[in-house]
């Protein structure tokens, strides 16, 4: 219960901050994109900066539009199509189980993506409430919809393939590194666990990263400010993205025209919504002026979850560094059309 209360507290502070900013957001007009030149900073040492008109393509939740999200099947699909679909970054979410295993999972519960309610006889089956072995009975493709149907719905017991079961972070990364050939994927890994569980997940993830010498190819993230602070204090050598409060602070400083270096940001990337995920851009987070401001401060702009071709074209032309999408092939085609 304490973890849930902590999450509520964090959300509460974020919501209050947003409401404090609303008058400013609504009364200050956005700069017109075509009238502002795109600023390019090739001298930057930020590895997540992209060349103009060549943003990184990130498979969001391992390519959730093409295969069940955060499953080994999804990563197998990316590797199998690597020759025709260019993916630069693999993005996925991790949480800690009751027995300390680090598994791939976005929601705090298994309910939405699996048969958890049926399997455990209750709703709200939190990842942290069951062991890894207990979670193996779940079909993680239960509610995946592809081509208008649910191809994996109803699979139970031995009929559930290995690549649709709950999978550990170790297994996924080892599979990718063993099968990617000469390609070196970058990783964006978000810690979804909160409170004490979030800190345990960070410790575990740090071990996974360093044991495989992936420090230079991983950027980790969390929306929980306390977990973010734990990352900075204990593992400052691992690059990270801004947490929820830092993202709001960034936007405030940008809109006020203040010097972001006054707060000494320790993150190198900002992951923010655009399009339908940003209430159809009631607040436009994808304009050139803001992207330039981020680049001036050595911060990469990574946008989620961009599944609309026109949005991808808009962000690409405005200098975005990364397009996080459920449909990498579509995103590649949209980016190509900008050149």
Image (spheres, helix red, strand yellow):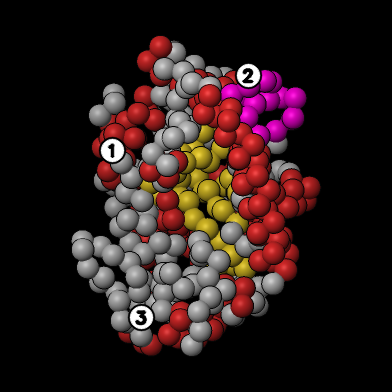
Q: Position of residue 99 (x, y in %)?
A: 65, 78
Residue at the disc numbered 1: 309
For disc 3, the marked residue is: 160
Q: Which residue sits at x=25%, y=29%?
A: 337
Residue pictured at 48% horizontal, 51% vertical: 91
Residue 120 disc label: none
Q: Give the residue displayed 45% in from the left and 41% down from the top.
A: 278
Evaluate whether residue 45 shows in this view: no
User: Label 2 belongs to which residue?
Assistant: 257
* Looking at the image, residue 153 lies above or below residue 7: below
Q: Position of residue 14 (x, y in %)?
A: 64, 46
Label 2 with label 3: CB-CB less than 8 Å:
no
Looking at the rendering, the stretch of residues picked out in magenta corresponds to: 249-265
Q: Residues within 10 Å of mark 1 (few under 14, many from 20)?
A: some
**Residue 322 occupies quadrant:** top left
Task: Say whether residue 107 is visible.
Answer: yes
Which numbered disc, 3 or 1, marks the residue closer to the eye?
1
Q: Nearer the viewer, residue 81 or 143?
A: 143
- Looking at the rendered structure, the secondary structure element under dot 1 is helix
Reading the chain from its start, which is encountered first: label 1 or label 2? Answer: 2
Residue 58, picture quadrant:
top left
Q: How many marks?
A: 3
Earlier-in-chain disc, 2 versus 3 = 3
Residue drawn at 51 percent across, 33 percent down = 301
Q: Earlier in the sequence, mark 3 or mark 1?
A: 3
State the predominant SS element of the stretch in magenta. helix
């Amino acid at each position: 219960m304490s973890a849930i209360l902590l999450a509520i507290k964090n959300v509460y502070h974020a919501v209050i901050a947003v409401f404090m900013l609303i008058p400013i957001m609504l009364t200050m007009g956005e700069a017109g994109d075509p009238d502002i030149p795109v600023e390019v900073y090739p001298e930057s040492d930020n590895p997540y900066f992209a060349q103009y008109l060549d943003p990184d393509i990130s498979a969001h939740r391992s390519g959730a539009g093409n295969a069940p999200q955060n499953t080994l099947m999804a990563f197998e699909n990316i590797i199998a199509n690597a020759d025709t679909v260019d993916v630069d970054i693999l993005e996925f979410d991790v949480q800690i189980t009751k027995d300390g295993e680090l598994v791939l999972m976005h929601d705090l519960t298994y309910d939405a993506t699996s048969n958890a309610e049926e399997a455990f006889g209750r709703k709200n089956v939190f990842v942290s409430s069951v062991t890894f072995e207990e979670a193996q009975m779940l079909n993680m493709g239960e509610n995946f919809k592809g081509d208008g149907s649910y191809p994996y719905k109803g699979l139970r017991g031995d009929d559930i393939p290995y690549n649709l079961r709950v999978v550990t972070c170790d297994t996924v990364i080892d599979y990718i590194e063993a099968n990617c050939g000469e390609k070196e994927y970058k990783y964006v890994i978000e810690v979804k666990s909160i409170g004490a569980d979030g800190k345990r997940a960070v410790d575990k993830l740090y071990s996974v990263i360093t044991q495989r010498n992936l420090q230079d190819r991983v950027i980790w993230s969390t929306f929980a400010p306390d977990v973010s602070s734990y990352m900075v204090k204990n593992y400052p050598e691992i690059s990270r993205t801004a947490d929820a409060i830092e993202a709001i602070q960034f936007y405030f400083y940008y809109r006020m025209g203040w010097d972001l270096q006054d707060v000494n940001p320790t993150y190198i990337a900002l992951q923010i919504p655009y399009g339908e995920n940003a209430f159809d851009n009631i607040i436009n987070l994808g304009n050139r002026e803001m992207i330039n401001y981020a680049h001036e401060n050595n911060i990469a702009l990574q946008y989620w979850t961009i599944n609309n071709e026109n949005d991808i074209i808009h962000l690409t032309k405005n200098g975005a560094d990364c397009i996080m999408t459920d449909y990498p092939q579509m995103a590649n085609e949209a980016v190509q059309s900008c050149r």
